[in-house]
Amino acid sequence: MGEQLTTSAEALRLFFTEDIYLVNSDDKILGAAQPELKPAPVPVLENPVPVLENPVHVAANAVHVTADPVVEVVVPVVVQLVPEIKVAVPEVKTPAAEGVVFKYLGKNQKNILILVNDTENEVSTDKGKELLRNIVKALQLTANDFALLNYAAYANTGFEEFRNFFKSNLVFAFGVTPLHLGLGEQPVNEIIMQGAAQLIFSVNLDQLADDQAGKKALWGSLKKLSI
């Protein structure tokens, strides 16, 4: 059998009725038509946004973006305010701030306070006042040195209130007990210390005038005082 290959164009058209495309490849020949590849269409905007050329202006409370002398966009800045918190401070009152004025005898130049407790007399009975004069004379004091106050007119006043007002460094209390002044139980006719202040508690002057043992014990303590 002779060679069956032919190169006649008319003969080839009898076997291949479709278009034949030659591809620059040694792999194969495609017998079907290939679709034409076209680039995707680029969408065209009807109202294109212009590119901003002007700088952005930033203010303290708003941002101004200027794209054109005619167009201006304002973005408000929201600032949240913190409510003010107020703390109530209690007022501290002293006897002077409350209008309390102590009525007393003497000038208190040596900051010595003498308390008596008599609801019927300004100071005490005659024999009570005589005993007090003897005590003051024994200590070599005058009316300029001390303040003499009747506690009956200022009941429920504590030691610290008296001390703050009179600046007392020595207190004689006749008929005024430590409990009256807001202090604990203390012995009578003896020197006790309350901070830097010296205190002596004794019975009422009128009662002490007839108490020989009490006067003797008191006299022993008076000699130990630092005035």
Image: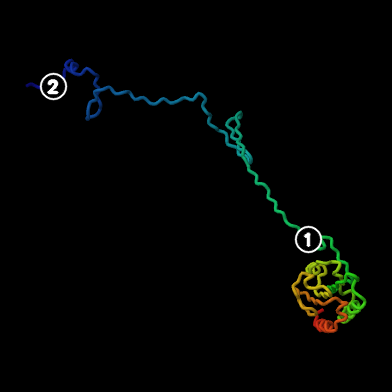
Count neighbours of disc 2 (C-alpha within 10 A) and say few if under 14, some if 14 to 19, many if 20 or more: few
**Mark 2 / mark 1, whichever is N-terminal:** 2
Whether residue 206 is situated above or below residue 39 in the rendered picture: below
The residue tagged 2 is 5
Give the residue at x 39% y 26%. Answer: 40
- Kindly identify which numbered label has been placed on residue 93: 1
Side of 75 where 189 appears, left or right: right
Report x, y in % for residue 117.
85, 72
Q: Say what amino acid the circle numbered 1 marks.
A: Lys
Q: Is 204 in front, or is 160?
A: 204
The residue lying toward the viewer, choosing from 198 and 167, is 198
What element does badge 2 sit on?
loop
Q: CA distance from mark 2 to mark 1?
A: 131 Å
- Which image quadrant for residue 160? bottom right
Name the residue nearer the viewer: 108 or 2: 108
Q: Nearer the viewer, residue 144 or 131?
A: 131
- Spot the residue most to the left: 1
Position of residue 87 relative to residue 26, above or below, is below
Left or right: where does residue 190 sit relative to residue 135?
A: left
